[in-house]
Amino acid sequence: MEDVKKPKRKKKNQVPAGIGLLIVLVVIGIVLAGISPMLSIYWIFGISFGFVLQKARFCFTAAMRDPVLTGSTSLTRAVIVALMLATMGFAAIQYSAVSKGLPIPGNIAPAGIFTAIGATMFGVGMVIAGGCASGTLMRVGEGFVQQWIALVFFIIGSMWGAHDYGWWSKVFFSKSPAVFLPNIFGWAPAFFGQLIVLAILFAVAEWYENKKLGSEEE
């Protein structure tokens, strides 16, 4: 019997849909600008950030999960580079303020056992959900139903946390130290020490990927 070839589905032309979406985005931006110029700036930034996020496939979950599942550490290294850039940016802003006698800008949060417990719970949850906060928002826009459910519970959890924040602050946060490395080690050791640690992690991640994927190819 001859093999029956299934007819290939014609790809839908998405150009009209893209143009229509662009028009809608521009109209919303104009409406927001009429209310407040800052709203239009937020809108443009949000759209641009979402576009870059989607194209880069940037996700903290994948950065922690891929080395274990696939051996790839490309996203892990991307997160490390982002942390290095953030370290340099925040250090410049904070040191500039301190040198002028101003309060240290930024939210220096207390750390304790609750930090480790919360991080573990969030890490397990985002792996089960298949995405972190940024990855979930990105995949919601792509139409993944599972991420819609995750987003709903993100909102519920945030509202619950905000409702009980006073209790957590009174029982745990107010009794825990706020860790700010420059106050402990000094500005130079804290700044360069953090960059060195991140650089070491980057090198380890690259070595791990080469070893893991190289051994699978042999």
Image (spheres, rainbow, N blue to C red):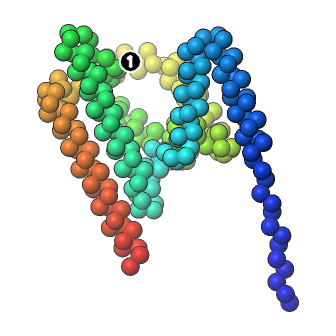
Counting labels gives 1
Q: Where is 157 relative to 143, above or below?
A: above
Q: Residue 85's quadrant in the figure? A: top left
Q: Where is residue 15 in the image (x, y as percent from the top left)?
A: 74, 45
Query: Image quadrant for the N terminus?
Result: bottom right
Residue sitting at the far bottom: 1
The answer to which image quadrant residue 185 occupies is top left
Query: Would residue 19 appear left or right of 4 to someone viewing this image?
Result: left
Please, what secondary structure does the residue beneath circle 1 have?
A: helix
Q: Where is residue 28 in the image (x, y as percent from the top left)?
A: 69, 22
Residue nearer the viewer, 188 or 23: 23
Give percent across and percent down for residue 197: 22, 44
Q: Would you name the residue on which mark 1 appears?
A: 169
Left or right of residue 115: residue 136: right
Please determine whether, in this image, residue 139 is positioned above or below residue 185: below
State the image quarter where residue 10 is shown. Answer: bottom right
